[in-house]
Image (cartoon, grey):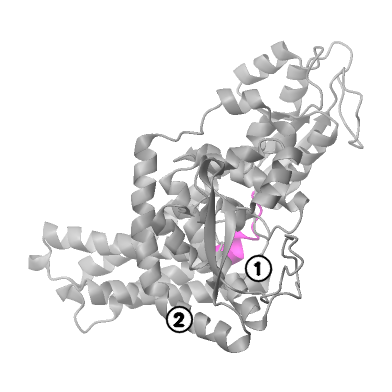
Amino acid sequence: MIKFFNHYFHRRTLLQMALDMALVTSVFMAILLTLADVEKTTSDLIVRGLGRGLLMGGGFLTVNTALGFYDRSNAFSATQMWARALVSFVVTGLVVVGVLLLLPLATFYGRTEAVVGVMMAAMVLLLYQVLVGQFLTTRLTRRKVLVYGTGTRALAVGERVKRPSSNAELVCYFASPNEHEHLAFTFGTLGEGQTLTDLVRASGVDEIVVALSERRGGSMPMRELLDCKLSGVRVTDIATYFEQTAGQIRLDAVSAGWLIFGEGFNQGFLRTTVKRLFDIVCALGLLLLASPVMLIAALAIRLESPGTILYRQERVGLEGKSFDVVKFRSMRSDAEKDGVPRWATAGDCRVTRVGKVIRKMRIDELPQLLSVLFGHMSLVGPRPERPYFVDKLKQDIPFYAVRHSVKPGVTGWAQVSYQYGSSQEDTINKLQYDLYYVKNHSLFLDLVILFETVGVVLTGKGAQ
């Protein structure tokens, strides 16, 4: 894993993105230099052409990111992959044509070679991602992982390692001498005169993940773990492992000390100012673009059922302060006529027919852009919850209040990483993603989340 602007990526994912960007740009530049007259091939033409090539490459990356091609945790079927490849090809073509129309170069007047060439390159890349990127074995780049522990935490790590997206191979579980919880069916132990370092070297282990249920009483061989690290083997604790590979901070593996003394949780003035300016510019732009859709939604809501078009609801925001969130009404007006707050669930009978559509396409969230302009919310952040639930969740879930150290968001890392939350268990799982965002938030991570939100909207993932 590589940490890039406070967010973790697989090395091969970054390499693939860089190669895709380079290939699209290079193909465009090659066509430009081939078509241009020698006497007109100036440094100015090359610079302007390079800028347009980078825009095309960036558009290709943006489209593919939104469609999930670079998210190795997604397990798409062959049909889904081909459908996404077709959408990517069409949208990429629109991007290429748009760049050439909006930023024309005299070399391409009346000629289609640039469009054809770039689209052929895009087709090759998409074929690679479908046929090779998803199905070709990666054994040559797999890391061999030893899980130090045999209890509940160790099994959680083992399940994560076994996922195809992890690009890792589970060598074995290894039992600590003082660990009494053995849930793993098979696990290794040291033979007479053998050390952990010997076992790691003999098995060719690349990484040790320490996932003990109990660390006190000399349960960890510190000297041997240090020897492994000094010999080039990566030694990781369970909290760091899940942060880097799953984009979450697991509540069952983290402590207050880890949160306090670890990196992250930076809320500096510069970061806050940049994020606020970013929110204002994006919210204004999105409101302008979405205004026709919002008008249609308002009319549909008015025609289908009696009641207000918009509804206000008290939510908890930054530093635990309450504010009113505004959304398009997607439920009946008497959805909570008994006055008892309740989570929305799958197939909720309170949702209207129009409500099902606007929820699936996330149109009901668009009025919250006004809350972003007023400063109550950010474009990206943990979703704000109702005070009734917050009071209960703070008592039942450790570190729940940490999510209130940043402004709540219209979309967030938990929303693009996890299904719709309709229970306390779902809330715990989503909090683990929220903690990751609070710890590692940056403008770059906000952009990643916004790109993935586009994919969520296009696929209707997690809608209720």
Look at the image and tell me whether residue 166 can be seen. no
Q: Which residues are magenta?
A: 129-140
In front of the other: 19 or 71: 71
The reply to whether callout 1 and callout 2 are in contact (CB within 8 Å) is no
Q: Is residue 272 magenta?
A: no
| Residue at 76%, 40% in the rendered image | 396
Quarter occupied by residue 140:
top right
Q: Give the vertical position of 377 relative to 453 (above or below).
A: above
Q: Position of residue 423 (x, y in %)?
A: 76, 55
Mark with earlier residue (1, 2) = 2
Amino acid at pointer 1: Ala
- Alpha carbons under labels 1 and 2: distance apart: 22 Å
Quarter occupied by residue 92:
bottom left
Marker disc for residue 64: none
> Which residue position is annotated with label 1?
463
Marker disc for residue 295: 2
In front of the other: 151 or 206: 151
Q: Position of residue 450 (x, y in %)?
A: 48, 58
Q: Quadrant of the N terminus?
A: top right
